Image (cartoon, rainbow, N blue to C red):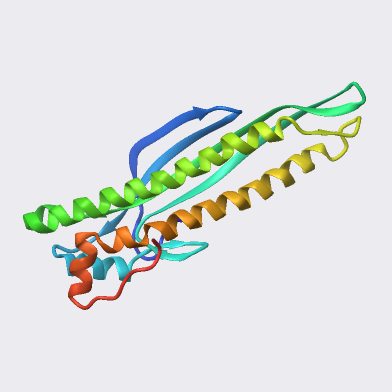
Amino acid sequence: MRILGRAGATLLALALSVSCAAAGGVSSSTTYKVNPVKGTTAADLWRYMLAYPIIDPDDGPAFANITHEHRMSVRTQSAGGLCRVTDVDFHWSFVITLPKAVNYAQMNAATRQMWDQFTAYLKKHEEEHRTIFLDCGKSFVPAAGKMTGLPGCPGMDRKVRAFIDKQYAACMDRQRAFDRGQKQSVANLALVRAAQGAGLPAGKGF
C-alpha cells in the first residue's frame, strides 16, 4: 500500500501531478509514477512483477502502492486565560506508483484486456487509499483546530502533533481493513487467475 519502490526497476515519473484542497485546512498533491514490467503473456508479466516488485517500507513487495509525506503548521494565540489553536494547515504529498507494461504492443488482445483490467483495478485501489487519508484528515485537522491549553501556549504545538499522530494510527487501521476487504476481488481478476493457473505463486502487497 505505502510504497516508494526501487527493487531493480527504474521508476519513471509521469508528467502528471494533481493538487486538490479539502475542508478543514487539508490540502494535497498527487504525483503518479510507473514501475516498468516486461512480458507479453499473463505468466510472463506475473513472473516479472514477482521478481521486480515495488518494495513497500511497511508491508514488503507490492505490485502498486501509495506513499505520502505531510507538512503541517500550527498557529496558536493566548487569550481569555487559555491558549487556543487558531489555525492548522495540513498538506499531504502523495506518490502513487503503478505497473506499466513495456511490451504492451506485442501482447495479444486477450492479454491486453487482462492487463488493462488489472492495472485499472490497482489505480482505483491506490486512489481509494488516498481518499481514506484525506477523509481522515478532514476529521482530525478541524478537531485539532479546536484544541485549547494553558495560557502562554507552552507545549501546545507538541500537544496538537501528538493528537494528530494518534488519529493517524487510527486511520492506518482503516487502511488495513480496506486492504483485507479487497483480497477476494483481487483474486478474481483475470490476470491473477491466469497466472496462478500457470502454477505461479500468489503475490504479496495487495
**Residue 106 located left or right of residue 195:** left
Residue occupying the point 14% across, 65% down: 41
Q: Is residue 88 above or below residue 80?
A: below
Can residue 2 be seen here? The reply is no
Can residue 80 be seen here? The reply is yes
Quarter of the image for residue 145 reads: top right
**Residue 21 located left or right of residue 107:** right
**Residue 92 located left or right of residue 127:** right
Residue occupying the point 37% across, 49% down: 125
Q: Which of the image's four quarters has the C terminus?
A: bottom left
Q: Give how far across and how far down residue 165 sits, in percent.
A: 67, 48
**Residue 88 located left or right of residue 56:** right
Residue occupying the point 68% across, 44% down: 164
Residue occupying the point 90% across, 21% down: 80
Quarter of the image for residue 144 reads: top right
Total marks placed: 0
Identify the residue at the far bottom of this view. 199
Q: Give how far across and how far down residue 124 sits, in percent.
A: 34, 46
Q: Give how far across and how far down residue 99 sits, in percent.
A: 30, 55
Q: Nearer the viewer, residue 107 or 1?
A: 1
Q: Is residue 145 above or below residue 186?
A: above
Q: Nearer the viewer, residue 25 or 19?
A: 25
Quarter of the image for residue 73 reads: top right
Identify the residue at the far top of this view. 80
Q: Is residue 148 above or below residue 33?
A: above
